[in-house]
Structures are given as structure tokens and as C-alpha cells.
Image (cartoon, rainbow, N blue to C red):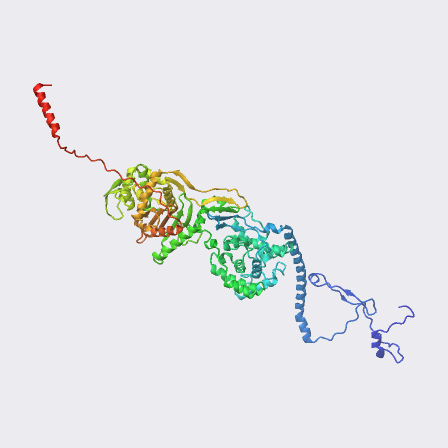
Amino acid sequence: MAQGTRRRPLVADKRYATAGRGTQGKPSARKAKPRPKSTTTRRKSGWFGLFGGGRKTGGRAGGGGGGGRGPRKPQKPKTLLGRLLALILAPFRWAFRLAWGFTWRVGMISTALVALAVGYHYMKLPDASALLDGRARGSVTLTDRNGEVFAWRGDQFGGVVTSDTVSPFLKNAIVATEDKRFYRHFGVSPRGVASAVRINLREGRGPLSGHGGSTITQQTAKLLCLGVVYDPTEWESERAYERDCRQGSLWRKAKEAIFAMAMEAKYTKDEILSIYMNRAYLGGGAYGAEAAAQRYFGKSANQVDAAEAAMLAGLLTAPSTLAPTNNLQRSQDRAATVLRLMQEQGYLTTAEMRSAQNSPAVLSEAAAARAGGYFADWVMDTIPDFFGSETTEDVVIRTTIDQRLQRAAEDALNHVFDTKVRKGSKAQAAIVVMSADGAVRAMVGGRKSRVSGVFNRATQAKRQTGSAFKPFVYATALELGYSPLDRVLDAQYCLDVPGSGQWCPKNYTRKFYGEVTLARALRDSLNIPAVKVSEAVGRDLVRRVAGDFGLDSELAAGPALALGASESTLIDMTGAYAGILNGGSSVTPYGVTELTLIGDNTPMMGASGGLGERVIQTKAARELIWMMEQVVSQGSGRRAQIPGWQAAGKTGTTQAARDAWFVGFTADYVAGVWMGYDDNTPLSGVTGGGLPADIWREVMVRVHDGLTPKPLPMIAPKPIAPPPQPQPRRRQRPNVGQELGRAVDGLLRDIFGN
């Protein structure tokens, strides 16, 4: 301290002023103990220093200036209890400091890593327009003969929609149902996750089981498979790829959240919503809002009303289960819940909600038909796989089906089974209706008509044809010059069959009818005359004629060929009868008339069948039609008569009545009906002239409703003239004048000579 400068009294000087100074104010002889110099100590480095240590302690000397801390206030001595509590809490304070230090450092590192991951995905994300159609395969759209859509196959994509072009009802319904805070979060909603965990625990599930709390952005990230594109060389199958994309592990959820945040940074909310609406699967093979709206309601996604929008949004939870084509009532119930959510969130007024709930959405006519049923399945089987089940393009197939005739066939089958078949019967039936050129107009492959992907009895079931085969025996005879009025003896008849012994056919009635015409033999379905005619013209020739008409499925080699011992499908039998109607030319049944790619007007494929080569002469075909008309008007098929129409056909019943047939035609359409059990159980009291003929009549009455009756193209045979009989010579009355002249001439020759 400089000389002459008066030192400020210290607190200590004042404290000891009385006790340390004499009466004269001088310091006492007792000197204060010098204060140790200020020292600064640093805690030891190490784990403690890393997680919250490193703080300096200590202070400056009492005389130091310059901003040092003053002396600490003396603390009261701790009690024993205080020391004990401090000792107990010390480990906890240390653990807290350790945890806090660890947490904020790990948090900062994690945040940095997340930011890097988000940035990485951000850089790899393409433009939003490139993510709208995510199908790996194409679709097939089927139209009827009039160009109306009636069925879909494959991954259907109706076209790109955006949040601006779809109906506002649909946009609001999706947000209200899937993510009501969509426009307020950054891709992940902690509040939504917490709510989902609470619901899962309340319902007795694990915290991450059931409700996931995923935002629309996270769901979109999952639909994009977190940016991983399907590569056939890397994945065992597309199914395996999709299964990996749908994983629900905790690690997968974390990656999904990172990808979602990258999307939020890259795209606008409306772009994310547009991707979601185009990529989401909505059941029935429909991907995206446009395809689903067309699939279920026959209209564009920008035209759906509140009830329809609610139904579409409701499918997002469980598209296959809630699809209205599977269970319309369940889908409508789910839509009612969506409408309530829209009202609660202000998208609908109470009146609008109630109006929509009271008038729920219903399926379009095509959707109600369950995607084309048996016919659509058959068509898909007849086209090449690269245009069908394995197509990578969007294909449009124009078909031959007539939806009015399809409904007629379905209604007729249901009517007969409801009114004439005992309840609980498991008997099955199939129907095919076609034009004379083989174009299939209607097909029913079983009693459950509005199904797809199931066994089709019209095209897949090979059954014995029975007497329905006999027209081809007589077609062969007529082609060789026989007349429908030629006669054959119906009497006891036996043949020696090599390897089987003697075989004696019997008539269904177990009676013999003597000499009968070919026309009557067919009319009454007599077995013995059919076998005799087949043997007379030659079995090989009968097989050839039947095969040329389309019945070439391993025809029997023995004499039972004439009685329908061979097997055939209903569609082939109906096609063979169509060949008779068209004048004797074979036909190939077909269902496709044209196949094109969407965006390309040039057909890739034309008709898949139609008229073929001539099998028998037109005259023979016309005579056979006359014979078959007798079956319906006078014979075993009388129950198939159609009021006001000429009809021709033939019944068929196999051994033990395991199969019953009726196949026939009018001038406009050919139809075939089969009835039986899938397990070959014999029918009880059913023949081809019974229930199958009833079904055929009900089908054809509905098919011909509103049409003008036309005569069958048939020729009645000319009566066969009986063989000439010798005529007895008539005795003439003698002429008296002539006799007298001849007598006189003779007398004169005797007298005078010549």
C-alpha cells in the first residue's frame, strides 16, 4: 500500500475494535491470525468431470479486489439428522447430475444424427409427381358388349388425383379419420402416439399393439416402403417385399418417423396428402381414391358425396375386411362413424351428417355384380398371361357378355331353386348362353353367382353328357344321306365288346317300340336305335363329327359312345349345339372381342374365337334342327317349351342320374344347362327333361323378353314314297264286232288259203 494513503477499515477491524484495542484506540497486543492466501482448486477430471464437473471452487483473499467473491456467510452447524439426510441424499444428487449430464449430451448427439438422417432422405426424395402411382403391376378393365365396365382385375389405378381435384368431402373425411392434426404436426405426432398407447393399454393390448398413432405422413412413408423400390433380383417375391414394407417393429417405426420428417421438409402438406390418396389400397383391387370411386360407385373421385366419401375413408382402416363388395352393411356402419367424426371436427353440420347417415352409399351395378363373377374369371384364363394376371400395363378388354342376359340367367337359376328344389339341397347347376357364332353372352358357374376366383362348373367341370350327345350321332347319319324318316328296329340288341363281353343297351323305359323313324328315336331319346345308327355309320366317323363340332375331350371308343359315355364341359356342349344352329359350322366359344392398352387405340388382340370350318352340310344341319324341334314340341323336352317361340334341344341323363342336361336353342340364342352334385352323388328324381329343362325355359323366357319371335332355320323332311306295288291287270269287255270280223277272216283263210 502506498504511503500516505489511508486504509479503509476492514470488517474485521470493526469487529475487533472493542476487544482488540486499548482505551487509546491502539491495537492490542493480540494479533489477528493471518488469512491464508486465496487458492483456486479444480475438481478432478474423469467421469465426474465429464458429466457435470469442472466447476471452480474457492475465492480470493480478503484483501484482494477486482471482482472476487466475498467471504462465505457462516453456516449453522448441521444437526445429526441433517448430516444423516445429506449423507442419504448424496448418492441421489450424484446420480441425478450424472444422468442429466449423460442425457443432454446423448440428446444433442441423437438430434444431430436424426438431422443427418432426415437430410439424407430429403436429398434422395424425388418430385411428388413421381410417387403417385406405386403399383408394381398393371390392371385389367373388362367391358361388356356395349362398352360398359363390369369387372376389374389386377391392381386397379383409376388415374392421378390431387387434394385440390378430389371432392372436398373425401379430403376432409380422410383427414378427420386418419389424422385430425395433419396440418399442425411435423410428420410425427407425439400426442397421437401417447393417445394410441393409452387406448392400447386400456383395451388390454401391448402399448404398440393395435392403434399405432401414425400420422398420414407416416402412413405415406410406409406406402412408399421408406423409399425402397421393388427389385426382382433382390427379393424372393413381390409378396416378400410387401411383407418387409409392412413390418411393425420399433426400429421400423423409428425409420418411418425419420422418413416422414424428411417428407415434411421436402413436400407441402397437400402434396403428401395427394401421394397418400393415390397410393392407399382401398379394397377390391383398387389402389387410390379414383380407382376406388370408380370401382364401388361408378363415378370419379371428384364427384363423390359425403356418404360415399365417408365410405371410402372408412376403408383405410381395413380395406379388405370393410370393402363394400364383401359386406355392404359393415361398410355403411363404418361410414356412419366417419361422418360423426367429420361433424365433430367441423367439416359437416349436424344436419348434413344426419342426412348422409340416413342415405348411406350403395354400390354401383357393376360393383354389386362382384367384379364379373365366373365370366370374368374365364376371360382372364383365355388371354395370355402377359396381358392378364402378369400384365405390367393397364389393359382394357372388350368382351361379349350382355349384362341383361347375365341377370336373366342368374334370376332364372335362383327362381327354380327357390320354388322347385328342396331346402338345404347341395345340388349345383351351371348355365351358358351364347350366340350362334360362339360369343358367350352369359355364364353362371354355380348357385353362388356373385363370386370370383372359385370353381367354375360351366368351364372346368367335365361330366358325362348322356343322351345330350345323340344329336351328333344323327348328324353323322344325315350327312351320309340318311333321312329323319328312315326307320330302325327298336328291339333286343346285344354286342360283343372286346375285353368286356356282351353288352346289351336298354331304353330308359325298359320297353321296345319296334320299327321307329330316326326322328322318333331322337324325340323319345331311345337308346337302342342310337347305338344301331352309330354302329351302322361307324363310331370313328361319329367321333370325328363330334370332335369337329368341339367335343374332342377323349371321346369313348366303345359302342357306349352313342349314349354319351364321354365327358365334356358345359361350354363345349353349348358351343357344339351352336354349330348345329348356324348351319353346320364349328364354333370356338369366346368372350374377348378386342384388347387394347390404355392410351393406345390400336388393338393388341382381336376376337379369341368364333366360326370355324364346316362340319356337316347345311341341309343335314337343317334337318337335324327339325328333329330336335320335335324333342321340345312333342318329346322328352316338352318342359322346355317357350310360349310363342320355336325351340329345339335335347335332354341328357347319365347313368344313375349323376348328371342331368338340357341344351337347346331358338333362332337367336343357344343355351346349355347342367345340374348335378360336385361329388357325383346321384340326383334324386331328376332327369334332363325335368329341372334342367325348367331352368333352361326360365332362362330363355327372360332372355327373349321384348324380342320378336323368329322361326327356326329348319327343313322338314320330304315324306318317303312307298316302294311301287305290282298292279293287277284289268279284264276288258270284248268288242263283238271286232271278234266277228276276226272269225270271218280266219274262216276265209282256211277255205282259200293265204
Quarter placement of the N terminus: bottom right
- Tell me if 667 is positioned left or right of 168 in this view: left
Name, please, the residue furthest toward the left: 751
Name, please, the residue furthest toward the front: 737
Occupied quadrant, residue 619: top left
Quarter placement of the C terminus: top left
How far across and down, in percent of the image, does residue 582 sit? 38, 42
Q: Would you place residue 498 above or below residue 645 in this image?
A: above
How far across and down, in percent of the image, does residue 98 sit? 67, 64
The residue that appears at 89% across and 77% down in the rendered structure is 26
- Tell me if 400 is positioned left or right of 178 in this view: left
The residue that appears at 62% across and 58% down in the rendered structure is 187
How far across and down, in percent of the image, does residue 323 sit? 49, 57
> 326 or 732, which is in the foreground?
732
- Tell me if 429 is positioned left or right of 109 in this view: left
How many dots with numbers?
A: 0
The residue that appears at 26% across and 46% down in the rendered structure is 507
Q: Would you place residue 149 above or below residue 310 in this image?
A: above
Q: Would you place residue 357 above or below residue 396 in this image?
A: below
> 51 or 257, which is in the foreground?
257
How far across and down, in percent of the image, does residue 319 sit? 51, 57
Name, please, the residue furthest toward the right: 4
Name, please, the residue furthest toward the bottom: 23
Q: Is residue 613 visible?
A: yes
Q: Is residue 472 visible?
A: no
